[in-house]
């Protein structure tokens, strides 16, 4: 029995020895706090360069800036841990109207493996075998001081304040719901949660934006998601994004490719689009140049498509619908209250289920167009149809003094319905191979 226990012990001894050596090779965690106060001029910019720990901005009660660093360092070698700890300081430098503070000197390389990290600083010094490095940074800053914040891999939180703030953030989140001034944001692989801003300039990459409102917005976004309550006159360049917006006052200037947008209420729009999916519940005025787009529009005042190529456009109710240069389009309208104008159209389909009692008519010219317009018998109109190889189905017996001719592959029909006048809606259609049903 004793021999069996001895044999088992000798078998387990190398494993026990390895574990003891591994434990002894890891330095105990070093927890430390550094605090400092310093003055700042009202017109100075306070810049914070940080990484590897959360950065929190709080409002100071006085005119001084207070900084606090809390860090937790572990490593395989106590010597490397101590060398790294000596690097952690509240370094302060003032140049050209900017006061810069940082917890660490500039890092030129950060290499992380499964079990540890190697850090090389720009001065050439390096530490190895760092198993844990967390550096929390808290700043109490007087309200109104302009801030320039930079962080990597950890979040930035800004407590309620006004003034100008710029943020550069990588693989982390920004929480600043109480920020009310001007924000310049550069965000990659993170989420920004913001409240109501005076101004927002944003560059987003594979990120998420949650925003209550911005009086002014200018944004360049790629592969990002956006959830916004209200904007005024925004200017957006986007690529493969998703937008959900409650309300836009003024004009939305949008240059987009491959995005999906849902907007509940839009005052005006100026669009340059490519393969964009657009869901607009209500829009007053829209001007667009678009290719391969899909539009679902609930209610619209006026829609102008300056150029349209292979677009699928569905509209619930619209005042005026105009397309100046369209090809291969599919236009479906439930209710038309104003005028439809299609010029230089090529191979499009137009369907209008019904027109309102005060509609203004149709003005359509082009080639290979299919037209279907539902006109109630109570609505009287004037007709002027002229097309080579055309087809026309309409209530012929309801017209007085109709001039109708179908000769030599040319169809012409001109007249006025019984009960119509010179001020009634005018249906004017001309072109080549046009098939119309009225």
Image (cartoon, rainbow, N blue to C red):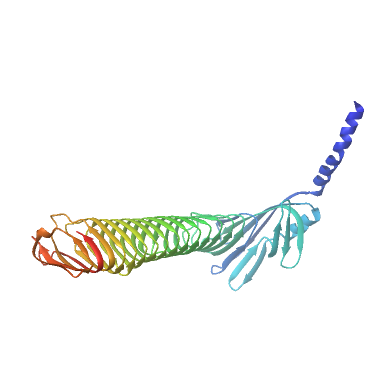
Which residue is at 44% across, 59% downward? 259
Q: Is residue 45 above or below residue 193?
A: below
- For this view, does 267 lie left or right of residue 12? left
- For this view, does 82 lie left or right of residue 248? right
The foreground one among 256 and 82 is: 256
Residue 355's image quarter? bottom left
- For this view, does 366 lie left or right of residue 379? right
- For this view, does 366 lie left or right of residue 92? left
Residue 299 visible (yes or no): yes
Residue 105 visible (yes or no): no
The foreground one among 390 and 409 is: 409
Which residue is at 83% across, 46% downward? 21
Residue 395's image quarter? bottom left
Quadrant into which the N terminus falls: top right
Q: Residue furthest front?
A: 408
Q: Residue furthest top?
A: 1
Residue 429's image quarter? bottom left
Give x and y (percent) for residue 27: 78, 50
Give x and y (percent) for residue 425: 16, 64
The foreground one among 218 and 88 is: 218
Quadrant into which the C terminus falls: bottom left
């Amino acid at each position: 029995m004793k021999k069996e226990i001895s044999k088992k012990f000798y078998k387990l001894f190398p494993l026990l020895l390895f574990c003891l050596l591994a434990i002894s090779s890891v330095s105990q965690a070093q927890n430390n706090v550094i605090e400092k106060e310093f003055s700042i001029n009202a017109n100075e910019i306070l810049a914070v360069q940080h990484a590897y720990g959360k950065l929190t901005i709080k409002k100071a009660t006085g005119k001084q800036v207070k900084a606090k660093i809390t860090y937790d360092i572990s490593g395989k070698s106590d010597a490397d841990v101590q060398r790294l700890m000596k690097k952690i300081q509240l370094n302060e430098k003032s140049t050209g109207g900017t006061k810069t503070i940082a917890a660490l000197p500039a890092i030129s390389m950060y290499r992380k493996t499964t079990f540890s990290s190697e850090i090389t600083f720009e001065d050439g010094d390096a530490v190895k075998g760092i198993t844990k490095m967390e550096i929390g940074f808290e700043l109490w800053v007087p309200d109104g001081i302009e801030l320039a914040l930079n962080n990597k891999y950890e979040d930035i939180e800004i407590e309620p304040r006004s003034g100008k703030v710029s943020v550069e953030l990588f693989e982390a989140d920004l929480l600043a719901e109480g920020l009310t001034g001007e924000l310049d944001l550069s965000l990659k692989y993170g989420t920004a949660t913001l409240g109501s801003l005076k101004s927002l300039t944003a560059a987003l990459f594979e990120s998420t934006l949650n925003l209550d409102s911005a009086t002014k917005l200018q944004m360049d976004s790629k592969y990002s998601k956006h959830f916004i309550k209200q904007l005024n006159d925004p200017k957006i360049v986007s690529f493969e994004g998703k937008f959900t917006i409650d309300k836009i006052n003024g004009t939305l200037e949008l240059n987009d490719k491959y995005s999906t947008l849902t907007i509940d209420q839009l005052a005006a729009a100026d669009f340059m689009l490519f393969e964009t999916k657009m869901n607009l519940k209500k829009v007053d005025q829209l001007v667009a140049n678009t290719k391969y787009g899909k539009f679902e529009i609930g209610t619209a005042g006026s829609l102008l498509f300056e150029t349209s190529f292979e677009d699928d456009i569905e509209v619930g109710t619209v005042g005026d619908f105009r397309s100046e240069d369209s090809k291969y389009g599919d236009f479906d309208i439930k209710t038309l209250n104003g005028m439809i104008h299609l010029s230089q159209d090529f191979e499009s389909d137009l369907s209008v289920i019904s027109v309102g009692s005060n509609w203004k008519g149709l003005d359509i010219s082009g080639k290979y167009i299919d037209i279907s317009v539902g006109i109630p018998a109570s609505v009287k109109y004037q007709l002027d149809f002229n097309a080579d190889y055309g087809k026309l189905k309409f209530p012929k017996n309801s017209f007085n003094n109709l001039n109708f001719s179908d000769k030599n592959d040319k169809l012409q029909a001109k007249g006025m319905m019984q009960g119509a006048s010179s001020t009634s809606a005018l249906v004017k259609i001309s072109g080549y191979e046009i098939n119309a049903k009225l």
